Image (cartoon, coloured by chain):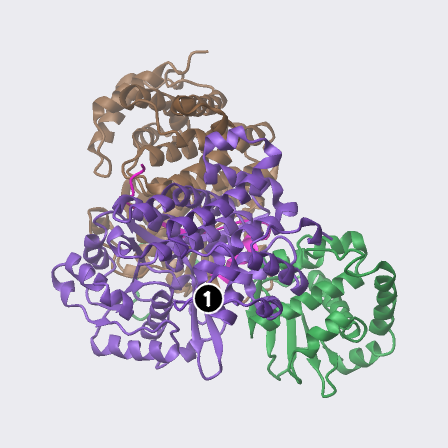
Chain colours: A purple, B brown, C green
């Protein structure tokens, strides 16, 4: 275990996990001196009946908690301001967010406005605007992938300026993150696959990026281990609650790891591909993850070779000669993508060129790659990547990831 | 299949390594504070550690309210009252606890006094909940970096108060604060770290996050203990040990207090010998006892203590036992540096019996006096040479 | 404060516990100031000489003002794109005019680590040593320019520590590097520097 020259680690959310985790929320809220939460969610979650399940579990007074269920997929600050109004009208004193990344970010934004006062989220832009403990925030992730419940960032769009606003503060971490298998049971297999691969990419990148530290390492290790042991099993046995809970745990662990050790080029290219081609985030991550490892191999060989232990288990690790471990780890991730592809009847894409929308149209065209490569220079995730990734390098990687061929190592510039 | 029925909280932000002290002003600013009161003990004061800390505030916007350096080796309410007066009169808005875990205790007591605005803490010790938001608390461990201050306990006048609101907001680990430990002091800290990790590992409802913290603590401890004992002047092992201490303490704060901790706290209170000595002597006995009663531990222990290569190379069936063996070796190494058995401390056995009975009457831990006595009996002779 | 009643019946003597105002360390400040001056002038020169740096600054809007420095009390480096679209180093006074992009190193000690090349720019960014005010893509663009300038200004043995990947011959041929280095040094320190110093004093 490497103790870096410097590191900081903060993972302030209290994690409640278990088969009856939902039932514990009222008591825990009372401990935070709150009793009237506003439930924020999106239409998909509402229609899946998850909010009702949550309310039922929180029997008693909380059953009548007001619900705002119209958070759109691309939430902006208008939505945040509107929900803040609902919160105040109902005289709430806490927020329960039920959903994926967009709902969670929106809830964080709402919490800023309602806790610090003011009319609109726009008043709180800029570094260091949030310096106080906010109202109690409970997050119930329903996707087991984003890990947003463990991050200190809220990304909220400003449609007028066509910009993303970043709010960063340790006070944005929720007070409680509740993991209950009932929340993820209804996920279809290909979404389970994509979100779990998202979590796997968080954990792998946390493992090899520049800001890695002993705690993020241990969390990432556990996360990878849990994903590799449970993902294919869950796809085949979607009703197994313990395995679902294991995946939810893995996602949260990976979230805690990457929130402290940051993510690298896989997310760098993935964010931009998502933005340019409107591709689901998890699919990009799954397709790009092996390339991130390959590209950084010459700098982080030893570290990446250690990934084989959680990926393949101790027996394979011990049986593989040291110099082959890194290659084997990369091959295993490719194999995992292939297995998921087979298990979901081809709905889990292996390469960028395989990502298609509902009508079967290809979302990432080869002629879009130069644009993605150029825009990748403006994404923050390029900084923690161990090797420099300029536009040429990004284009080279993207071409391989599009076609699904292993990287041509001779083309990687090593300086 | 591991169980996922658990709760876990790690409140503090840990900052460790180069220039970490200099981050304190920025951390205070992020918590909307700019005028800290520094609480330190005489040992840290004698090493002039407070001056290093003050130097770290150079060129910042902060003003240091005062340095309260009256703390000896006992944290009591009268001292807390004095410091709380100082805090209020100077208009401070944050606390920095520098030095041993006692200064963290004192800082916590001050924090409750000034934020609840009451001179009487007895209600809280008997179960009343904290109602007000506390001021930001920064912990700068120095001296014995056993991490005790990183937990969520306040020990004042031998009473214990647990609350998750008591955890420090920021923990700053800097090599400048950790230099010059004598081997027996390092061994005491290591003993407490190892015991914290062990009790977190074996406590009920572990969960993967607590395991990750235990893993980190034990790994850092076992990797660095030889270097830290052999050459106390080297910065890196000392920093790694302090990291292990803090991380183990956070893990332990998420589990019920272990038997070793409770008994050694009681013994230390009674005899005025340092707690780490007792922990070091009792821990091997506790491991042996646990092996007899509960069988070998989970195999993850081997991964934590020995690392990936050894773990993978050990056949699956042997991993639990091997993990216990390696932990035993680690504990024995620590004990050897303490160089004593319980008997050699020349405490009459009736006092040990009394300490064990006190341990049973502690409201915070469910420990039987008979178990405690059994443990003390095993540790009486120490490890056979 | 009015409600305050002393906790202790043996109040501590306030005189024993003086308030402490932190000092400033002039030496470190001076060193950083000189380094920032070199970087500022180097950026201005490189923006004319090196096509990569030029392209980075071309993409920024005209009138763009950037400020790099140490918080909270300086020193600073201010540069601005003038009307002709050229980058000009304006000196070390953080102007009243608002900077579009402000990169603040949290404290002098971190700045010393950065400018004594114990930490690369990327690593310092990762270690949270910077506070970025303004748009993140612009900050990243600026950092890319900074890396390039470091390659020119510093000898290889030091620059390797300061940047992630030191460009090899295929990325930046040796002869070109040396030629540009000479041009940048000449531009940075000779005719214009006196003007800047004069203006700032």
Please tell me which residue lies in front, B214 or A207: A207
In the image as oriented, which residue stretches furthest toward the left? A60
Q: Position of residue A96 (x, y in %)?
A: 27, 64
Magenta segment includes B4: yes
Asked if B29 appears above or below B108 in the picture, the reply is below
Q: How many marks?
A: 1
Please tell me which residue lies in front, C135 or B248: C135
Which residue is at 62% across, 35% downward?
Answer: A323
Please tell me which residue lies in front, A174 or B335: A174
Asked if B263 appears above or below A331 in the picture, the reply is above
In the image as oriented, which residue stretches furthest toward the bottom? C83
Can residue C19 be seen here? no
Callout 1: helix, strand or loop?
A: loop
In the image as oriented, which residue stretches furthest toward the top? B385
Which quarter of the rendering shows the N terminus of chain B?
top left
Magenta segment includes A251: no
Residue range corresponding to the magenta coloring: B1-27
- In which image quadrant can residue A35 be found? bottom left
Please tell me which residue lies in front, A138 or A7: A138
Can residue A38 be seen here? yes
Q: Position of residue A322 (x, y in %)?
A: 59, 33
Q: Position of residue B338 (x, y in %)?
A: 47, 23
Label 1 packing within 10 angstroms: few (<14), some (14-19), many (20+): many
Left or right: where does residue B169 sit relative to residue C157?
A: left
The residue labelled by disc 1 is A279
Left or right: where does residue A101 sit relative to residue B141?
A: left
Which residue is at 62% across, 83% downward?
Answer: C96
- In which image quadrant can residue C8 be found? bottom left
């Amino acid at each position: 275990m490497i103790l870096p020259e410097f590191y900081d680690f903060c993972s302030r959310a209290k994690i409640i996990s278990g088969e009856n985790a939902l039932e514990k929320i009222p008591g825990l809220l009372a401990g935070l001196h709150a009793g009237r939460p506003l439930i924020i969610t999106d239409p998909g979650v509402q229609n899946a009946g998850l909010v009702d399940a949550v309310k039922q579990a929180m029997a008693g007074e909380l059953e009548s908690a007001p619900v705002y269920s119209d958070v759109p997929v691309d939430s902006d600050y208008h939505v945040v301001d509107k929900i803040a109004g609902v919160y105040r009208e109902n005289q709430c004193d806490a927020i329960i967010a039920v959903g994926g990344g967009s709902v969670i970010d929106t809830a964080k934004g709402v919490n800023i406005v309602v806790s610090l006062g003011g009319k609109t989220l726009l008043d709180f832009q800029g570094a260091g605007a949030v310096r106080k403990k906010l109202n109690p925030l409970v997050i119930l992730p329903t996707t087991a992938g984003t890990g947003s419940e463990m991050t200190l960032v809220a990304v909220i769009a400003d449609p007028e300026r066509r910009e993303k606003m970043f709010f960063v503060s340790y006070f944005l971490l929720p007070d409680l993150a509740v993991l209950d298998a009932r929340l993820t049971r209804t996920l279809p297999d290909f979404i389970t696959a994509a979100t779990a691969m998202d979590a796997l990419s968080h954990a792998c990148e946390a493992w090899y990026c520049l800001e890695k530290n002993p705690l993020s390492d241990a969390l990432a290790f556990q996360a990878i281990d849990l994903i590799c042991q449970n993902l294919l099993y869950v796809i085949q046995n979607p009703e197994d609650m313990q395995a679902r809970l294991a995946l939810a745990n893995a996602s949260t662990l990976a979230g805690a790891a990457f929130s402290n050790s940051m993510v690298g080029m896989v997310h760098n290219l993935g964010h931009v591909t998502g933005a340019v081609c409107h591709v689901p985030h998890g699919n990009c991550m799954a397709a790009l993850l092996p390339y991130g490892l390959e590209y950084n191999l010459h700098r982080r060989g030893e570290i990446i070779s250690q990934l084989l232990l959680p990926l393949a288990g101790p027996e394979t690790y011990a049986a593989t000669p040291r110099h082959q471990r890194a290659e084997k780890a990369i091959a295993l991730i490719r194999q995992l993508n292939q297995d998921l592809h087979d298990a979901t009847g081809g709905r889990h894409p292996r390469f960028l060129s395989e990502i298609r929308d509902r009508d079967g149209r290809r979302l990432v065209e080869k002629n879009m790659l130069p644009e993605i490569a150029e825009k990748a220079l403006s994404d923050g995730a390029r900084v923690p990547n161990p090797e420099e990734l300029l536009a040429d390098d990004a284009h080279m990687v993207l071409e391989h990831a599009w076609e699904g061929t292993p990287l041509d190592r001779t083309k990687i510039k090593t300086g | 299949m591991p169980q996922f029925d658990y709760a876990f909280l790690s409140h503090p932000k840990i900052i460790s390594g180069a220039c970490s002290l200099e981050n304190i002003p920025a951390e205070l600013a992020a918590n909307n504070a700019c005028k800290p009161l520094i609480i330190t003990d005489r040992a840290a004061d004698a090493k002039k550690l407070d001056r290093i800390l003050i130097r770290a505030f150079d060129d910042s916007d902060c003003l240091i309210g005062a340095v309260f350096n009256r703390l000896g080796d006992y944290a009591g309410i009268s001292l807390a009252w004095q410091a709380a007066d100082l805090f209020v009169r100077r208009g401070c808005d944050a606390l920095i606890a520098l030095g041993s875990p006692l200064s963290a205790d004192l800082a916590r007591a001050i924090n409750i006094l000034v934020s609840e605005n009451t001179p009487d803490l007895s209600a809280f010790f008997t179960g009343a909940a904290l109602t007000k938001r506390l001021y930001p608390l920064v912990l700068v461990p120095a001296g014995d970096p056993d991490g005790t201050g990183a937990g969520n306990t306040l020990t004042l006048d031998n009473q214990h108060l647990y609350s998750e609101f008591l955890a420090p907001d920021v923990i700053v680990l800097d090599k400048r604060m950790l230099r010059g430990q004598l081997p027996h002091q390092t061994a005491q800290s290591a003993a407490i770290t190892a015991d914290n990790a062990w009790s977190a590992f074996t406590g009920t409802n572990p969960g993967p996050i607590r395991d990750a913290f235990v893993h980190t603590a034990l790994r850092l401890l076992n990797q660095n203990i030889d270097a830290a004992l052999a050459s106390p002047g080297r910065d890196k092992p000392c920093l790694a040990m302090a990291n292990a201490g803090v991380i183990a303490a956070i893990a332990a704060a998420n589990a019920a207090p272990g038997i070793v901790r409770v008994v050694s706290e009681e013994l230390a209170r009674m005899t005025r010998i340092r707690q780490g000595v007792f922990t070091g002597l009792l821990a091997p006995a506790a491991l042996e006892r646990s092996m007899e009663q509960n069988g070998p531990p989970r195999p993850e222990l081997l991964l934590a203590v020995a690392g990936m290569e050894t773990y993978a190379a050990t056949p699956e069936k042997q991993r639990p036992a091997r993990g216990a063996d390696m932990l035993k070796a680690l504990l024995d190494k620590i004990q050897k540096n303490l160089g004593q058995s319980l008997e050699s401390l020349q405490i009459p056995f009736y006092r040990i019996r009394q300490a064990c009975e006190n341990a049973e009457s502690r409201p915070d831990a469910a420990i039987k006096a008979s178990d405690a006595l059994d443990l003390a009996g095993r540790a009486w002779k120490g490890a056979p040479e | 404060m009015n409600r305050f009643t002393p906790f202790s019946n043996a109040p501590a003597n306030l005189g024993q516990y003086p308030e402490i105002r932190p000092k400033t360390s002039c030496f470190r400040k001076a060193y950083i100031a000189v380094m920032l001056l070199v970087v500022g002038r180097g950026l201005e020169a490189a923006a004319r000489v090196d096509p990569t740096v030029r392209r980075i600054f071309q993409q920024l809007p005209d009138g763009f003002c950037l400020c790099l420095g140490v918080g909270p009390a300086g020193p600073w480096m201010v540069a601005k794109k003038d009307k002709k679209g050229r980058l000009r180093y304006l000196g070390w006074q953080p102007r009243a005019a608002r900077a579009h992009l402000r990169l603040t190193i949290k404290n002098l000690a971190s700045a010393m680590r950065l400018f004594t090349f114990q930490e690369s720019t990327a690593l310092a960014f990762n270690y949270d040593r910077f506070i970025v005010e303004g748009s993140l893509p612009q900050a990243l663009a600026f950092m890319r320019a900074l890396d390039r300038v470091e390659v020119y200004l510093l000898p290889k043995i030091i620059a390797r520590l300061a940047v992630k990947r030191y460009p090899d011959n295929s990325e930046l041929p040796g002869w070109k590097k040396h030629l540009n280095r000479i041009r940048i040094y000449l531009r940075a320190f000779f005719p214009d520097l006196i003007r800047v110093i004069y203006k700032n004093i």
